[in-house]
Image (spheres, rainbow, N blue to C red):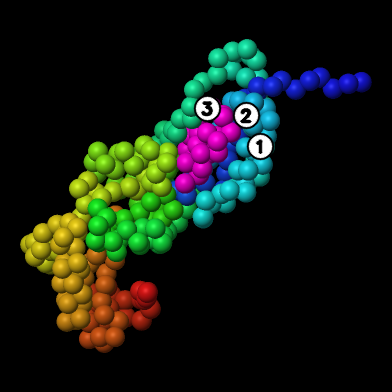
Amino acid sequence: MSRPPVARRARLQLACRGVVQGVGFRPLVHRLAHELGLSGEVENGPGVVRLQLEGERIALEAFLRRLPLQLPPGARLEPCDPLWLPAQGGTGGTPPVGIRILAGEAESLGIDLVAAALVADRAPCRACLAELADPADRRFGYPFISCCDCGPRFSIATAEPWARAHTTLAPFPLCPVCRREFEDPADRRFHAETIACPLCGPRLSLWDGAGRPLAGPGGDGGTAALIGACCGRLAAGEILALQGVGGFQLLVDAANAAAVARLRRRKRRPAKPFALLVA
């Protein structure tokens, strides 16, 4: 008995689990789908990334083969069970146009702070470090530089799924240049939720213990001097509270016994080891 013919066009639904948020997974889906002539949408949801793609059946099968082989750094994809459906409106219907990148409704992270699909914070990548050190780059010296491959993730998340509106960067609307990068599929910051620059993102400033400003916001011109001032205070035995986008760190010169003892008294932590920061 012969098998019925497979329709040329089809619709594919996937529920992708693993470490699939904060790693550039949706931009990867967008790029692959565009290369294969597919249309549809990819949406972050709590603990899952949902895909609904439509196109030639052979192209959809190629997408399924390529997706696990081309994962971005840090991503981990669990085995997926594809659901095959008829093309939208049947084989002769009009398919949707393009690939939409979406984020679902927010679900606040509970007290246990479990977000299994979200990658941990990631150190700056080589491309961002090169921009950071380039005087001609608009992010030269910008301490909050990041892209799809690096930057804060878990420490700044306030809700699932992963989206800028669900992080501590939500109060910083994008400037026109960052917005263009965010929306450009050819840009390496395409849908990088942590995107920022000295014009629109958080900036550094230095305050004393009484809340008085000692140095103004550190843009691309003043950041180095501001960091130098902080380093000088650490070298003098002072304690520095560093507020980043993901919380506070208390910093002290680990080689200064008196400064470490002062921090231990204030923290009421007489014996438990402190973490060391190293290059």
Provide the residue span drawn in magenta: 24-44
Determine the residue located farthest toward the front in the rendered image: 136
Q: Which mark is residue 12?
A: 2
Of residues 200 and 13, the one drawn nearer to the viewer in this rendering: 200
Q: Is residue 149 left or right of residue 235?
A: right
Tell me the kind of residue under disc 1: Ala
Q: Residues within 10 Å of mark 3 (few under 14, many from 20)?
A: many
Distance in Å between CA atoms under marks 1 and 3: 16 Å
Residue 229 visible from this viewpoint: yes
Q: Which quadrant, please, contains the N terminus?
A: top right
Of residues 103 and 146, the one drawn nearer to the viewer in this rendering: 146
Of residues 216 and 17, the one drawn nearer to the viewer in this rendering: 216
Q: Which mark is residue 86?
A: none
Which residue is painted at 51% across and 39% down in the image? 31
Which residue is painted at 71% across and 20% down in the image? 7
Q: Residues within 10 Å of mark 2 (few under 14, many from 20)?
A: many
Marks 1 and 3 close (CB-CB < 8 Å): no
Q: Position of residue 249 (x, y in %)?
A: 29, 66
Tell me the kind of residue under disc 2: Leu
Q: Is residue 162 left or right of residue 50?
A: left
Q: Which residue is mark 1?
A: 62
Residue 244 visible from this viewpoint: no
Of callouts 3 and 2, which one flags the residue occurring earlier in the amino acid sequence? 2
Q: Is residue 141 left or right of residue 30?
A: left
Q: Position of residue 158 (x, y in %)?
A: 36, 46
Q: Nearer the viewer, mark 1 or mark 3?
A: 1
